[in-house]
Amino acid sequence: MLKVSLCGVELKNPVIMASGTFGFGREYAGFYDLSRLGGICTKGLTLEPREGNSGRRSHETAMGMLNSVGLQNPGVAAFIKAELPFMLGLGTAVIANVGGSEPEDYIKSVELLNGTGVSVIELNISCPNVKRGGMAYGIKAATAYAFVREIKRVCKKPLMVKLSPNAENIIEMAAACEDAGADALSLINTLKGMAVDVNTRRPVFDNVFAGLSGPAVKPVALRMVYEVCKSVKAPVVGIGGIACAADVLEFIMAGAAAVQVGTANFVNPMCGAEIVDELPALMERLGIKTIDEVRGAAL
């Protein structure tokens, strides 16, 4: 009833925990059996360890949150040694999210992950490209095409590219990544936002700008997933404000192959299990026998 396929990887259901919101699963394993999930995306991994951004890292907003964590992570090698064995024992698909600053770093990270048991590599192209003056790889379609093509040449796992809503044109961006060899696309990453502390009269975050996520961004995310699904053949994973079973079905009906749940994990650590439990009952009430039956129904 709930099984789906993502670029050749079979998932027991379409519910994946989003990168940066679930750690490596350790904290949530005490709340419920994580094998019930379709998959888990790792924290964003970089070639070398990162301590992340200074100052405040999260800020609550109306129907959402801003975050400025800064890719804090132990580095790819340490992840493979200390965290991956635990994740592979959870009984669900493991998706490794990879970030960086220079193409060479991404390439080395992907090459290290090629020899592991991760199911999919998710490429974060919202990171700033140091060699291009700090512009993210995922802003201009031509830049993204060249970058994804370079990574695809060395990647031996299914490659899923995570798109930024801040791209100049999300449809052109999706098409460029598909043409460059992306096996799947995930969207959206966080929207660029900020907050000001009225007491200090200064921006809340040391980096000034931060990523907005949560239910507030869902209509934007759904619109972009819909547009991309109408324009590409690659499977799409929908992300943005998903917090219940009905949200999952909306993204599936907009064409998504699966979804990722992010900010909701901070509000309710049980949300992953609850969504998986809610889906069969909701589908039965709506007369839906399988996820595939309604995929793209709204297109």
Image (tube, helix red, strand yellow):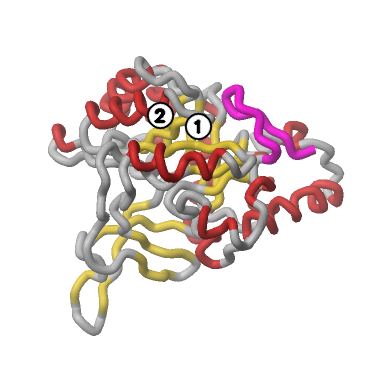
Label 2: how many Cα within 10 Å (few below 14, some 14–19, many 20+) = many
Q: CB under 8 Å between callouts 1 and 2?
A: yes
Q: Which residue is located at x 22 percent, y 37 percent?
A: 101
| Residue found at the far top of this picture | 153
The residue that label 2 is drawn on is 113
> Which quadrant does the C terminus fall into?
top right
Residue 180: where, in percent of width, then height? 38, 18
**Amino acid type shown at disc 2:** Leu
Compared with 199, 106 (above or below) is above
Mark 2, secondary structure of its residue: helix
Residue 61 is tagged as: none
Query: In the picture provided, is 39 more to the left or to the right than 155?
Result: right
Residue 88: name its quadrant.
top right
Residue 108 included in the magenta stretch of the image: no
Q: Is residue 47 visible?
A: yes
Mark 1, secondary structure of its residue: loop
Residues in magenta, as a range: 1-13
Of 61 and 122, nearer the camera is 122
The residue that label 1 is drawn on is 118
Residue 271: name its quadrant.
bottom right
Query: In the picture provided, is 62 more to the left or to the right than 109?
Result: right
Q: Which residue is located at x 58 percent, y 66 percent?
A: 268
Query: In the picture provided, is 277 more to the left or to the right than 145?
Result: right
Q: Which residue is located at x 25 percent, y 66 percent?
A: 205
